Amino acid sequence: MERTVVGQVIATFGRHLLVRAGTGEPLRARPFGRALEVVCGDEVRCRLDARHDEVHVLEVLPRRSVLWRASKRGGAEPVVANLTQLLVVLAPLPAAELFIVDRYLAAASAAGVPAILVVNKSDLGIAARLEAELEAYAAAGYPAVRCSAASGTGIAGLLEMLSPGSIAALVGQSGVGKSSLVKGLLPAAGVEIGELARAEEGRHTTTAARMFDLDDGAALIDSPGVRDFAPAVQALDERTLGFPEVAQLAAGCRFIDCRHLREPGCRVRRAVEEGSWHARRYESYRRLRRLHERLGAHRGR
Ligand code: GDP
Ligand code: ZN
């Protein structure tokens, strides 16, 4: 019988992978066959092959969650698997594009994982306007952690939000301080990534997705592909597009298939008119709805 082993993909360099089985040193691996799509965080079954220094990934085990990004052709492709939390990083500078933040939050919802807002560069001061937005997010169920990668303030608090065993993926606009945060979050002793991972990193020019262990048994996924991704609208819930506020209000709409745009008797729109739902979040919802319809994501699903 052939020997197989189950492990987790902790790094991807294009089709070159590192798979960690048990607590051992990661193994060099490659998907067996073109059709097999493997991403960082995936749990995979591999065939050990004594003759080669690479193992073959035969199978991707069922994913507990997937972060979907819009592919170049407008479809959906996985970027990270088995994440349990999404950390959406923003900062006073560069000024937060809240529409993009909202799209990341929607992607978390499509992945079925909770999201936290990480407000980095709090040393620069958080303007009253941003604070008001954070309040609206908190009301929608998205807590914010204020921190500063530069001064270290709030980093311990952020670590506390990552429960043992959790896998957190970091997203956010460029320049908000994600690299700085990764450095701040990793154990002070430095990143023990292993000889092989270091060697692999040197061998490939492809930008890598990496999973790092944190001190308390949680893990962090950092990947350029995850950082600036546009979420796949196809993966979003048809009714709510991933907005918890809409999910809550939609039961009060006259029509079961209400899109919450111009339909009469729309509870969602009424909430905005009454001021009980944030107008800017609603505007984000409308933009995402238009995008959803333009891409025809509502058809053929
Ligand atoms: P990334 O593009 O999201 O990975 O952002 P970087 O980590 O490269 O940071 C972008 C810039 O913001 C760099 O010049 C950092 O030194 C700076 N930066 C990162 N974190 C902080 C912070 O907490 N406070 C301040 N003032 N600057 C920061
Ligand atoms: Zn409605």
Image (tube, rainbow, N blue to C red):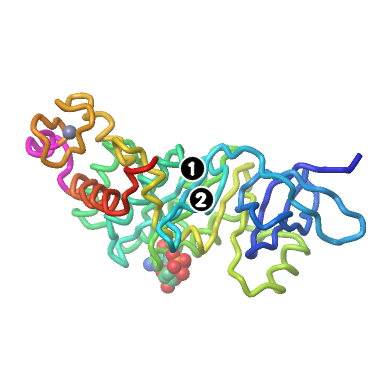
Question: How far across and how far down the image is residue 287, in percent?
Answer: 23, 52
Tell how many labels: 2
Q: Quick check: 261 above or below 97?
A: above
275 magenta-colored: yes
Magenta region's main secondary structure? helix
From the viewer's perspective, tell me whether residue 265 is left or right of residue 136.
Answer: left
Mark yes or no: residue 121 visible: yes
Point out the stretch of residues depicted in magenta: 269-279
Which residue type carries mark 2? Ala
45 magenta-colored: no
If the image is split into quadrants, where does the N terminus sit?
top right
Instruction: Specify the quarter for ligand 2.
Output: top left
Q: Quick check: 222 above or below 296?
A: below
From the image, tell me which residue sits under label 2: 169
Q: Earlier in the sequence, mark 1 or mark 2?
A: 1
Question: How far across and how far down the image is residue 114, in percent?
Answer: 43, 39
Q: Indicate which disc residue 85 carries.
A: 1
Q: Residue at x 40, y 53 (%)?
A: 231
